[in-house]
């Protein structure tokens, strides 16, 4: 159990101690270890101290009081769900403070000794009644929800190994964007959340198409509640990337190789989206928002018990958002519905099942962005409002996601869990984008339209089964998980018809108007892909000493992949290709070590192997061999104030062979239109640093800050993958004012990244080297929330305060770019039930 030891009255304030040790930790220096005797004094628990803790959710106020008092409070989050507190103002001892906060709650804080307390229900007054057993769920319990905690940090994750561990116990870089952080920053889409996530670069390639990069590599692995799904970056039919965040409790992002649970993949990471679940007490909210560009949003979230015994619980969530954007003629419309049931089949068996529906129906968007270069090779500069797409463009994505989890506790220490997820989505599109070719600098001629019309259907099924628990051996307790997972991905891109492709326009005068494609015109493209992978995994955490944990694991995987591509347009000769790959029995080992320096600091090191099949071809037309390599990471993780403030610093190195890089000046023979050839880079190395701080510095003051450095070089020391920023820094903070101003919360943050660039060639401009660049930039955002009453609050978010113009990514395939949203604001009213 994490512990916060009270400070002596003659010692520095706990905040100064924490910040000092955090800074030393981030510098990889030897941490300052305060004498245990100085921190172990408990006399202050009985002596009254002054507190100024604002009203709010009961769980939040209890956590703030425990942190300010220097004690540890353990509790099951379901005990405080839906309950409010009037806060605490004045001088109180620790027992008196808990008593005041828990008045009329039906709960009590029971002393456990050594400065720790346990929250439980008050025992019945009639001794003949059966007394409920104490619920001793520690702060690091797996699956602990973050909503209603007010926290910016979560102390539990199983994304890395499936073993339930705290963030400090996990020997890899994991960031958690909690429910409070999502609401403070008004993050409603996956794209905006990842843009604020440490170490993640979001590369927008169109209005509804973007890439996610970590440590220089694309993330194509998504998980829903730990169940693996695939995201084929070669198609726009990626429903995971279009999800509305109103249905999620938190998003966990692991940076680095994830071969233990995902099998084949880049050494980039995985995104685990944890859905909201039903609560044992009734709770909910309704919200309405209005903002720039005629945007509006509605939300409804209701949860609670369905039967009198509370053994059946449910939750319903719905949201709708629509409006214009900073891009001319581009409108967004998005709806989501989510329902989930949770049933206690027995004292040891829990069943969860649900269904979500989403419908994204944007109009007037673009799949590519504006041309990035003129015909003389110089880079263009268009207004952020310029649109490469026709006004009638549409790209509707409708998806259904059904899921179920069955968990059974075999004993107090062992459980088995079965999880399944089925994702079905259909896409219907029609478009014409002014992005093919290079305009003349003076006349604007030289651009042709890229587009057509068609549809696509995607089906994904994922399954995970595991058994995990702890056992006694050699006089100590150890943890083990054994599992099997399987995923099947099938994307059928129906033939797209076209009489738009290749139509010449003037980029300066076309005004986003052109005739729509006809359904009986020439067939344009047929793009079908199928992928299946399955494997078994195991991870064992050994504790040879109280302060040492060794984690070893491995996965055996099988992989199948097929890509069929047919392309035909009047300007080129017909072209078709089929790529098939198969791998069996690929073993990806995993190892980690965690050494506790004391109750606050832990050193760690980890190793993961890399395996990634590739579908690109070289200058001879041959498919590149699978990429293989190793991922190494060492770091220091720290916890303060009972885990409410966490810091982490990591050094990593990725070594790979057969890394695909563009073979500048060469093409794949026989392709029409001409496809860029790739070469396999041997001895590629990526090295970097991750630094992160999250949590509560003082009662009411939350902070998330990070710095990330990453650089990839080939065997000759030449830097490659230059469209990923070498440096990134991200900051967000929110502070609830004390005293008479405690209804007001102010927040703000900044994202900064260094220059990105690339050099390439295009068959349409022979002899010219294209050099695209986005200089370093920073973006500032602000937030203010005012609680009109205990139930009603108003929140104002202002994004891109200084109206910075910058490209959100560089598309080296189409040589196009799209500008980020200009300054905008959103005002949300929320009523809590």
Image (cartoon, rainbow, N blue to C red):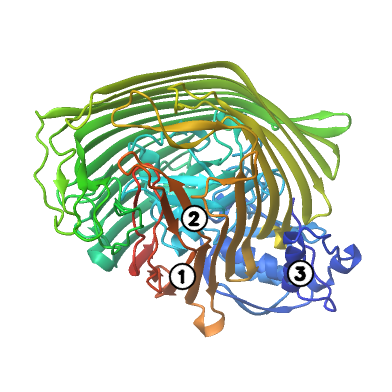
Percent position (x, y) of residue 40? 86, 65
Give me the disc on residue 20: 3
The structure residue drawn at horizontal position 51% and vertical position 31%, both measured from the top left corner, is 679
Q: Residue 314 in the image: x percent, y percent? A: 41, 42
SS at mark 3 in the image: helix
Q: Judge the density around disc 3: few (<14), some (14-19), many (≥20) Cα neighbours within 10 Å.
A: few
Which residue is rendered at x = 79% and y = 61% of the image? Answer: 115
Looking at the image, do the residues carrying marks 1 and 3 touch, with CB atoms under 8 Å apart? no
- Would residue 828 be found to the left or right of residue 524 on screen? right
Residue at coordinates 12% horizontally, 35% vertically from top-left?
499
Q: Is residue 269 above or below residue 468?
A: below
The C terminus is located in which quarter? bottom left
Q: Which residue is mark 1?
A: 780
755 shown above or below 747: above
Residue occupied by mark 2: 756
Q: Position of residue 810 (x, y in %)?
A: 41, 51
Which residue occupies the extreme front position in the image? 767
Query: Which SS class for mark 2?
Result: strand
Residue toward you, 544 or 412: 544
Say if 492 sits above or below 783 in the image.
above
Location of residue 374 with respect to 396 vertically, above or below: below
């Amino acid at each position: 159990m994490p512990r916060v030891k009270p400070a002596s009255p003659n010692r520095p304030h706990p905040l100064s101690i924490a910040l000092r040790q955090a800074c030393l930790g981030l510098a990889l220096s030897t941490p300052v270890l305060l004498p245990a005797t100085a921190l172990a004094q408990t006399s202050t628990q009985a002596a009254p101290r002054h507190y100024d803790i604002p009203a709010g959710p009961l769980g939040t106020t209890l956590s703030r009081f425990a942190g300010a008092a220097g004690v540890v409070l353990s509790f099951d989050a379901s005990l405080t769900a839906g309950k409010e507190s009037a806060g605490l103002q004045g001088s109180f001892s620790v027992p008196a403070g808990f008593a005041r906060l828990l008045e009329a709650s039906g709960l009590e804080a029971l002393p456990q000794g050594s400065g720790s307390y346990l929250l439980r229900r008050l025992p019945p007054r009639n001794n003949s009644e059966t007394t409920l057993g104490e619920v001793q769920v520690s702060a690091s319990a797996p699956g602990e929800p973050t909503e209603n905690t007010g926290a910016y940090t979560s102390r539990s994750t199983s994304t890395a190994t499936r073993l339930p561990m705290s963030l400090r116990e996990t020997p890899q870089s994991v960031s958690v964007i909690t429910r409070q952080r999502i609401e403070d920053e008004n993050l409603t889409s996956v794209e905006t959340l990842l843009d604020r996530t440490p170490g993640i670069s979001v590369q927008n390639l169109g209005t509804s198409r973007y890439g996610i990069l970590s440590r220089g590599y694309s993330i194509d692995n998504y998980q829903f509640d730990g169940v693996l799904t695939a995201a084929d970056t070669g198609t726009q039919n990626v429903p995971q990337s279009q999800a509305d965040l109103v249905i999620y409790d938190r998003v966990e992002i692991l940076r680095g190789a994830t071969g233990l649970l995902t099998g084949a993949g880049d050494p980039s990471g995985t995104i685990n989206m944890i859905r909201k679940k039903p609560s044992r007490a009734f709770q909910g909210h309704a919200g309405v928002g209005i903002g720039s560009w005629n945007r509006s949003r509605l939300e409804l979230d209701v949860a609670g018990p369905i039967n009198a015994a509370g053994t059946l619980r449910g939750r319903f969530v719905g949201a709708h958002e629509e409006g214009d954007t900073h891009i001319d003629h581009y409108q967004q419309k998005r709806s989501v519905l989510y329902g989930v049931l949770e049933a206690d089949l027995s004292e040891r068996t829990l069943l969860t099942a649900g269904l979500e529906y989403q419908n994204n129906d944007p109009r007037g968007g673009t799949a590519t962005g504006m041309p990035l270069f003129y015909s003389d090779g110089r880079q263009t500069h268009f207004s952020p409002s310029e649109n490469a797409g026709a006004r009638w463009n549409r790209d509707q994505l409708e998806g259904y996601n059904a899921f179920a989890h069955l968990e059974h506790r075999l004993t107090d220490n062992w459980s088995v869990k079965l999880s399944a997820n089925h994702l079905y989505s259909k896409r219907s599109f029609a478009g014409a984008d002014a992005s093919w070719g290079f305009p003349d600098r003076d006349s604007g001629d030289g651009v042709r339209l890229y587009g057509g019309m068609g549809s696509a259907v995607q089906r994904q099924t994922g399954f995970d089964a595991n058994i995990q628990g702890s056992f006694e051996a050699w006089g100590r307790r150890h943890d083990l998980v054994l599992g099997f997972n399987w995923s099947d991905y099938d994307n059928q891109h129906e033939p797209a018809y076209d009489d738009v492709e290749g139509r010449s326009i003037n980029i300066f005068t076309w005004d986003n108007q052109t005739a729509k494609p006809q359904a009986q015109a020439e067939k344009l493209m047929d793009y079908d892909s199928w992928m299946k992978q399955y494997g078994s995994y195991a991870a064992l955490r050994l504790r040879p000493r109280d302060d040492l944990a060794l984690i070893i694991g491995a996965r055996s995987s099988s992989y199948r992949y097929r890509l069929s591509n047919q392309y035909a347009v009047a300007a080129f000769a017909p072209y078709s290709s089929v790529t098939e790959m198969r791998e069996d029995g690929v073993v990806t080992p995993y190892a980690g070590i965690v050494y506790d320096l004391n109750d606050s600091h832990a050193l760690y090191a980890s190793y993961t192997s890399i395996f990634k099949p590739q579908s690109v071809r070289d200058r001879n037309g041959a498919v590149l061999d699978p990429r293989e390599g190793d991922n190494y990471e060492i770091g220091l993780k720290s916890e303060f104030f009972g885990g409410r403030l966490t810091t982490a610093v990591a050094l990593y190195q990725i070594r790979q062979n057969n890394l695909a890089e563009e073979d500048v000046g060469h093409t794949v023979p026989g392709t029409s239109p001409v496809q860029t050839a790739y070469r396999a880079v041997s001895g590629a190395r990526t090295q970097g640093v991750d630094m992160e701080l999250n949590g509560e510095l003082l009662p009411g003051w939350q902070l998330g800050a990070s710095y990330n450095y990453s650089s990839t070089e080939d065997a000759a020391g030449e830097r490659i993958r230059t469209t990923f920023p070498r440096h990134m820094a991200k900051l967000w903070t929110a502070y609830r004012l004390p005293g008479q101003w405690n209804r007001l919360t102010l927040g703000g943050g900044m994202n900064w990244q260094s220059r990105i660039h690339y050099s390439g060639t295009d068959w349409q401009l022979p002899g010219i080297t294209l050099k695209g660049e986005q200089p370093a930039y920073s973006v500032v955002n602000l937030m203010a929330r005012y609680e009109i009453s205990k139930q009603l609050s108003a929140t104002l978010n202002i994004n891109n305060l200084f109206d910075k113009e910058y490209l959100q990514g560089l598309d080296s395939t189409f040589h196009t770019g799209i500008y980020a949203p200009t300054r905008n604001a959103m005002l949300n009213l929320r009523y809590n039930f």
